[in-house]
Image (cartoon, rainbow, N blue to C red):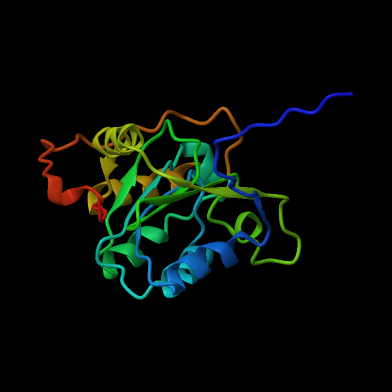
């Protein structure tokens, strides 16, 4: 029986639950979080992650908020008022399935875990999740910028439309009615709205 040996590649060990320890460890080393991307985000785990950050002035968050996610409570609409109060922008992108944390050091932590208690390992009955640290390339950043550029910024109008949708449909079973976002104002992007790293 032969074994396959791969040379010339750096070893990136898999990181298992609890994932929050890896994230908080990176932040405590002095690295800033720039971007959090996850389809499902619950308020308390998000607060725990952000509380571990010394600086939140450059953080941006991208989530999905699909109608079924909201009605089934796998995502919290209440993250928006919390983020607004803390001046952290929230973006919606209905196509994301990835879970990714990006740091100022140009390092990324990609993981199977959502920003939920079970996903990050805060609870007692946690999911089996893992992640891995990677160094981001220029093409990775192009993809990240594309995600943000093709996302909708959440404002009060968007939030209130979701609140009404949830109120109207919380007792209904699938298939749920289609959710129509309010008309998007003209997008005005600048490089200052995108994450910035040391390189």
Residue at image coords 56%, 27%: 175
Front-most of 52 and 72?
52
Classify residue 87 as left or right of residue 191: right
Query: For the image shown, how many numbered marks are present on the structure?
Result: 0
x and y percentages locating residue 105 in the rendered image = 35, 57
Q: What percent of the width, then of the height, locates residue 191?
A: 13, 45
Is 195 rendered above or below residue 151? below
Where is the N terminus found, in terms of image quarters? top right
**78 shown above or below 146:** below
Q: Nearer the viewer, residue 76 or 1?
A: 1
- Residue at 47%, 38% (x, y): give it: 67
Residue 181 location (% of width, % of height): 30, 35
Q: Which residue is farthest top? A: 1
Left or right of 20: which side holds 186?
left
For the point 32% across and 51% down, the residue is 159
Which residue occupies 60% across, 44% down? 112
In the image, residue 43 lies at what x, y percent?
48, 63
Residue 72 appears in which quarter of the rendering?
top right
- Residue projecting furthest to the right: 1
């Amino acid at each position: 029986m032969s074994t396959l040996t791969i040379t010339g590649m750096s070893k990136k060990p898999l990181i298992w639950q609890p994932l929050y320890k890896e994230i908080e460890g990176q932040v405590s080393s002095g690295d800033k979080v720039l971007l959090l991307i996850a389809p499902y985000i619950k308020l308390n785990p998000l607060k725990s992650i952000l509380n571990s950050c010394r600086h939140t002035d450059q953080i941006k968050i991208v989530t999905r908020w699909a109608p079924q996610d909201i009605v089934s409570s796998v995502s919290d609409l209440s993250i928006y008022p919390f983020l607004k109060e803390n001046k952290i922008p929230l973006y919606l992108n209905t196509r994301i399935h990835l879970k990714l944390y990006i740091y100022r050091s140009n390092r990324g932590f990609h993981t199977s875990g959502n920003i939920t208690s079970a996903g990050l390992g805060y609870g007692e009955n946690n999911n089996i999740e893992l992640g891995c640290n990677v160094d981001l390339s220029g093409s990775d950043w192009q993809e990240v910028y594309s995600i943000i550029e093709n996302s909708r910024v959440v404002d009060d109008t968007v939030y209130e439309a979701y609140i009404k949708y949830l109120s109207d449909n919380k007792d209904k079973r699938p298939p749920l009615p289609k959710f129509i976002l309010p008309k998007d104002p003209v997008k005005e992007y600048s490089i200052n709205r995108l994450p910035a790293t040391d390189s």
